[in-house]
Image (tube, rainbow, N blue to C red):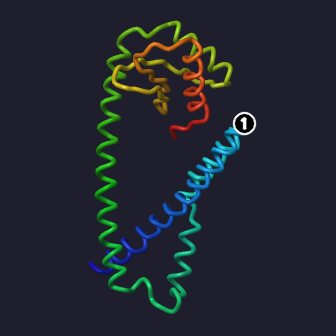
Amino acid sequence: MRWILNNIVINGFTYIVFGTALGTIVYLIWKLAGRWSEKRGYVDISYWIWKVVLLSFWCPISFFVLLKIRKNGLYGFEFWKTAFIMDIASILFFIWVAGTVICIIRYGNQHRKIHKAIRQCEVKEQSPILQEQISEISKRVKLHRSVKPVILHMIEVPMAYGLFQPKVLLPAKEYSQQELEVILLHELVHHKHHDLF
């Protein structure tokens, strides 16, 4: 049992923690650099930095650093075999698993409620004027997928939704023509860039 804990907890969990730490550091850099580049009108640069942030969460650099520490030790002391380190890592691992399960359940419940509301709204006829406006903006941004608008009372902000059947979810609010165009443009660009993936 101790061997299983050692291999799963110390090896797997520690790599996840260090990978997440690396991603978090790069994220904080993006918060500063992204704001700076957006203020100067370089939105594309900010967007590419964001892709680097996402990639850094999966980047194996921290994995190889940890393998080297494990092989050579850390300042002459066998870090991995220390009982205290094992106990702390085990406790953190179980807290992390519990937190992950709770987040998945909460996210799943929210997603299920929104999905149910969308199915009920799709039965009703959506605004053909809104659909026409989406089609026109889609052509402008070179989005070659059909995107449907759905107006929901349960949401407070507009959002892109659906990986395979893309939709733009809009709250049941009154928007000016200009506001609506900016909102639709923003959400359709999310679909164009496949941000939901």
- The residue pinned by badge 1 equals 41
Query: Furthest residue to the bottom?
Result: 76
Please tell me which residue is depicted at 38% across the width and 75% down the height of the picture.
Answer: 7
Quick check: 127 left or right of 118? Answer: right
Amino acid under label 1?
Gly
Viewer-nearest residue: 33 or 5: 33
The residue at the point 30 percent across, 70 percent down is: 91
Q: Residue furthest left?
A: 1
Q: How many marks?
A: 1
Element at label 1: loop
Q: Quadrant of residue 171?
A: top left
Question: Toward which corner of the image does residue 141 lie, by quadrant?
Answer: top right
Q: Residues within 10 Å of mark 1 (few under 14, many from 20)?
A: few
Q: Is residue 183 above or below residue 39?
A: above
Q: Residue at x 49, y 23 (%)?
A: 168
Report x, y in % for residue 32: 62, 50
Residue at left 30%, top 63%?
95
Kindly indicate the quadrant of the structure image that contains residue 186.
Answer: top right
